[in-house]
Amino acid sequence: MAGLFITFEGGDGSGKSTQLRMLVEWLEAQGKTVLVSREPGGTELGHELRELVLHRRGEMAPRTEALLYAADRAQNIATKVRPALERGEVVVQDRYLDSSVAYQGAGRVLGRDEVRELSLWATEGLLPDLTILLDLHEGLAKDRLAESRPLYDRLEAEAAEFHAKVREAYLELAAAEPSRFLVIDASDSVEAIAAAIRARVGQLLP
Ligand code: TYD
């Protein structure tokens, strides 16, 4: 495919959205046409799926959750991302299939391989050209969340264990596909991180 597909991954509070915005500004300054996207919720239908999967009250079975993320992904890739890549554009996306593998796989009910297979089925096998993993060690993630959300509470503290699992999964995914991943220490300065990302993306631009 003619375009370039770049995804951002990382735990909550890793600075993903700031870095994504800075990269998009830089790409546009280089004269590139950029499609900015996110999962879940990158399409109109996806917006409704996002509400369901993130905000609906009541129990949701692990397979239901995995399928909702996969449904959102299928719609996003088929209707937005693939057409943009075929037009030769750069797609920069907040989260993709590695989020499913790391988060849904971390619940211990579903295996990482089956979650990945489900996503690949949903997207007809589309993998990113580059995945930027903003790796945040646990203590720092907690501090940043506490700063941005005064209501940091016991529930979120309990979630810390889950986030440690998610981080571990991300690092293993990156180690398994070193040429697709750029792993960055999210505790570096915003400018240093942005520069490292630009250097890597610059190598991929035609
Ligand atoms: P979002 O508000 O986009 O958070 P963030 O700023 O952390 O990206 O919420 C996305 C949440 O959904 C996040 O906690 C990770 C989770 N998620 C999954 O569990 N599986 C997935 O496949 C995706 C795309 C996201």
Image: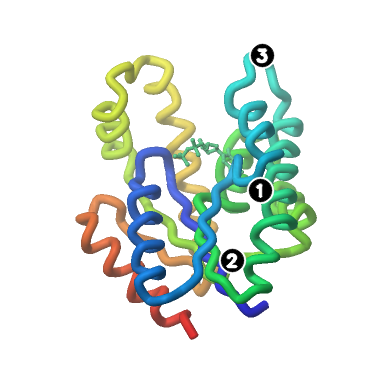
**Which amino acid type corresponds to the residue marked 3 in the rendered image?**
Gly
Residue ID at (58%, 22%): 55
Label 1 to label 3: alpha-carbon separation: 25 Å
> On screen, 6 above or below 63?
below
Find residue 26 and report its image quarter.
Answer: bottom left
Disc 1 element: helix
Please tell me which of labels 3 and 2 falls first in the chain. Answer: 3
Residue 153 x/y as whole percent: 35, 16
Q: Which of the two residues, 26 or 70, is positioned nearer the viewer here?
A: 26
> CB atoms at circles 3 and 2 under 8 Å apart?
no
Which residue has dot 3 on it? 58
Q: Residues within 10 Å of mark 1 (few under 14, many from 20)?
A: many
Please tell me which of labels 2 and 1 falls first in the chain. Answer: 1
Which residue has dot 2 on it? 128
Please state, as top left, top right, bottom left or bottom right, where the N terminus lies in the image: bottom right
- Tell me the colour scheme of the image: rainbow
**Which amino acid type corresponds to the residue marked 1 in the rendered image?**
Arg
Q: Which of the two residues, 154 or 95, is positioned nearer the viewer here?
A: 95
Q: Which of the two residues, 8 or 1, is positioned nearer the viewer here?
A: 1
